[in-house]
Image (cartoon, rainbow, N blue to C red):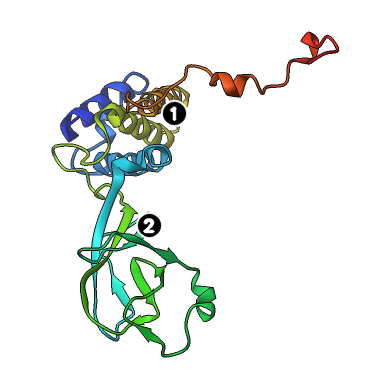
Amino acid sequence: MTLAEIITDIRSLINESANDSGALLSDTGNLLTFVSDAQEQTVLDLMSFMPSAFLGSENVSLVAGTANYALTGPLWQVWKVERNVTGESPMEIKIIDPSEIQYHMYTGDTAADPTGCYFIGDSIYFVPTPSTSVTNYAKVWMIKPEAVTMVTGGPAMIPAVAHRLIVYQACVIIATMLERDTTPYLTLYARRLQMVQRVWAGRFQSQPRFVRPASTERQGIIRNSEDYDGTW
C-alpha cells in the first residue's frame, strides 16, 4: 500500500464511528504522525516472528589502536557479528557483556584478531583493541526499523500482507486521542496479525510442515486420564 492508500483507508474506517474526525486530521500534519507511530508499533509486533523482513548488515573495518566504531544506521536487535576476512569462512565473534570485559582482556591489551565485542548504543567495541587495520573485518547482522517517516511509496520493509496492520493501528491511536471506542480497531488488528503470523509460518513450502504434531511426538503424549484403562 502507498502512503496515500493508507491515509484513505484510515479516514474511511475512522469516519465510520466519528464523522467529525476528518476536520481534526491533517494529511500533512497530525495524521502523518499517527501513521508513523502506527508503522513503528506494527514493526515491533512483526519482528518477533518475521525478523528476516527487517534484517540488514553492515561491514566494519578495523583501524589499528581503535576499539569502537559507530554503525551508520539505527538498530533494534543484533543477530550476530561475523569475522569476515576474505578467503576464509565467516566465524562468529562472541558478543560479551561490557561488565565482563575483565575476563576477556587486560588494560591496554591489543590483538590482530579481536576475540569478542560488545555494544553501547549504536557503536560496536572490539575486545581486545585491534592492533592492525583490516578492511571489512567484521559483518554486523542486525534488525533495523522502518524509516521514521513513511515515504510516498509506502513501507520499505514491512511485507505487503501486513500493510493493513498500520491502518488498524493508526485507527486505534486516533480513536484513543478522540476518546472513542478502540475495540473494533483492536479486533481488526489482532485478527490480521494472527493471519499474517500463520501465513509467514508456512512461507517456505519446501520445508517439513505438519497440521498437527508429528507422529513420533504424538506417540509420546500421555493419554488423557479419561481414556486410561490401567495399561500403557
Q: Quadrant of residue 44?
A: top left
Which percent across, then down, holds residue 13? Answer: 31, 22
Nearer to me, 200 or 121? 200
For residue 24, say whether it is visible: yes
Residue 181 appears in the picture as rendered: no
**Taking 28 as reference, is 207 above or below it?**
above
Which residue occupies 26% across, 51% down? 56
Q: Is residue 49 left or right of residue 134?
A: right
Label 2 packing within 10 angstroms: few (<14), some (14-19), many (20+): some
Viewer-closest of 107 and 91: 91
Residue closest to the far bottom: 108
Q: What residue did someone put label 2 on?
A: 80
**Quadrant of residue 200 within the rendered picture:** top left
- Badge 1 amino acid: Arg
Q: Which residue is mark 1?
A: 180
Q: Nearer the viewer, mark 2 or mark 1?
A: 2
Relative to residue 81, is residue 108 depicted above or below?
Answer: below
The quarter of the rendered structure image containing the N terminus is top left
Measured in 3D between alpha carbons, the distance from the residue under mark 2 to the one under mark 1, in whole angstroms, is 44 Å
Figure check: 2 above or below 218: below
Report whether 193 appears left or right of 64: right
